[in-house]
Amino acid sequence: MSRRVMETLAAEAPEVEIYSIDEAFLNLAGLEWRGLTDYARHLQATVRSHTGISVSIGIGPTKTLPKIGNHLAKAQPDAGGVCDLAAVDADHALSTGDVGDVWGIGRQWAAWLKGQGIHTALDLKRADAKAIRRKMTR
């Protein structure tokens, strides 16, 4: 099923980077579409039609933001499975996401960050990047 989903995405997007069995990043630079949220809904419908699988989609300018957006799309039923962090107040969205939900932050780092007063993805964004990097790259 994963192969069928990825093939469907590859047929619909200019560039697809398969990240894992159930995740992919789509580079949509230069894509001519009414809007990215509409495009994401088109992708959802196409994947469902071709595979019977429902997908959630996060949109953003970096790889981290779509992953957070995807998490929010799943957690907020009114989002319809799509969260475009490029089209909304990303800081507000980041303030609702636990630091442990940030890509690459495991349980141990999340616990350490929370001990430093960094509880949300927004707190992490606003933290001293050099100090965090020094600690987390040892």
Image (cartoon, rainbow, N blue to C red):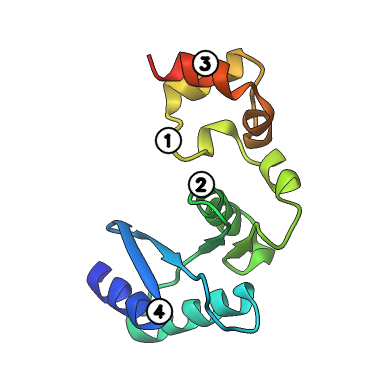
Q: Are marks 1 and 2 in contact (CB under 8 Å)?
A: yes
Q: Position of residue 42 (x, y in %)?
A: 53, 82
Q: State the residue position of label 3.
A: 112
Choose the circle earlier in sequence order: 4 or 2.
Answer: 4
Res 104 label: 1
Q: Position of residue 91 (x, y in %)?
A: 73, 44
Res 47 label: 4
In space, the residues marked 1 and 2 are separated at their CA atoms by 9 Å
Disc 2 packing (10 Å; few <14; some 14–19; many ≥20): some
Dot 4 amino acid type:
Val
Q: Secondary structure at mark 1?
A: loop
Q: Secondary structure at mark 4?
A: helix
Choose the circle earlier in sequence order: 1 or 3.
Answer: 1
Q: Quadrant of residue 106?
A: top left
Choose the circle earlier in sequence order: 1 or 4.
Answer: 4
Choose the circle earlier in sequence order: 2 or 3.
Answer: 2
Q: Secondary structure at mark 3?
A: helix
- Residue at point 49%, 82% (across, down): 45
Disc 4 packing (10 Å; few <14; some 14–19; many ≥20): many
| Between marks 4 and 2 in the image, the one whose residue lies nearer the viewer | 2
